[in-house]
Image (spheres, helix red, strand yellow):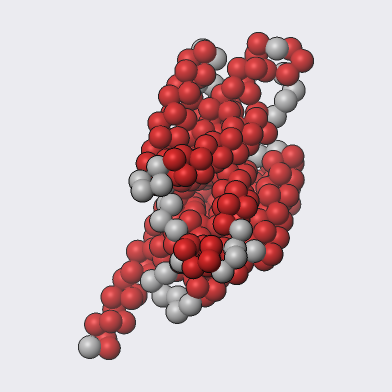
Amino acid sequence: MWEALWQYEFLRNAFWSGVLTGFAAPLLGVFIVVRRLSLIADALSHVTLAGIAAGLLLGKSVPAAAGWNPLYIGMGFSVIGSLFIEKLRAVYRHYEELAIPIILSAGIGLSVILISAANGFTTDLFSYLFGSVSAVSRSDVGTALGVTIVAVAVIFAFYKELFLLSFDEEYARVSGVRAKLIHFLFIVLVALVIAASMRIVGVLLVSSLMTLPVAASIRIAKSFKQAIAYSVFFGELSVIVGLLAAYELDWAPGGTIVMMAVAILLLVLGWKKWRRGRSR
């Protein structure tokens, strides 16, 4: 693959998009898992799919919109969905987890309606559902780069506030943390990372890249910062090895990346069990 990487632009686009996704998704995933919002990625990915279907439908119906990238419309839908999740969490204060299945259901329903209005699944929609190496364009790489830079900047600038909100929201509020603003920035950031990850991983698998590396890291990390470092490392390892394996074996890249993340998780769990048994 390394020789082909320098020969074909679409492979370079897929590789760099995957590397950026493998960094940004687990980085945010640590905070998502700690806050027990693991299913939020599934909810927002289906809302994003609705936006992409709307973009493809708009491109068919309106000639002036034919050249628009549906991914950007999907990002808009994802951000709106994230804001609705925050609003619903405030409405159902004692049942905050209800906000995620509500938005998930709405996203699935809207996606089905828009896909049927667009006369069923197309090649473009399938590439968003399962990820596609050949579908990643240079503009998609630029989008992933921009989103990753923003994600790193926000985490760096508000690390202390996000840490406090993740572990003790009441204490954070008493300490003067602007909880609503931080929640807003974080949820919007999650929405953008999910939308930017779709080209390489796909709608149905994007949540895996936010949770599986984190699940592996928290079994061996001894601190929160170490959990972040391990999560990013496992995420990058899953993406790079997954893309290499997918190219050599002619497998779907999204599924291969996810199965690499599952394999890493199983290896970590096995190693942890072996260490525990040895210490006894």
Of all residues shown, which one is farthest toward the bottom?
279
Residue beneath the point at 52% across and 37% down: 84
When asked about the image quadrant of residue 162, the answer is bottom right
Residue 160 percent across, percent down from the top left: 60, 69
Q: Nearer the viewer, residue 173 or 197?
A: 173
Residue 151 percent across, percent down from the top left: 66, 56
Q: Nearer the viewer, residue 243 or 159?
A: 159
Residue 222 percent across, percent down from the top left: 45, 79
Residue beneath the point at 48% across and 56% down: 32
Residue 250, visible in the rendered structure: no
Residue beneath the point at 31% across and 82% down: 275
Residue beneath the point at 56% across and 48% down: 187
Residue 202 percent across, percent down from the top left: 52, 40
From this view, report whether residue 246 is shown above or below residue 127.
below
When asked about the image quadrant of residue 142, the answer is top right
Of all residues shown, which one is farthest toward the right?
64
From this view, report whether residue 28 is shown above or below residue 118.
below
Number of numbered discs on residues: 0
> Can you say which quadrant of the picture contains the C terminus?
bottom left
From this view, report whether residue 218 is shown above or below residue 32.
below
Residue 118, visible in the rendered structure: yes
From this view, report whether residue 52 is shown above or below residue 3.
above
When asked about the image quadrant of residue 153, the answer is bottom right
Say whether residue 261 is left or right of residue 186. left
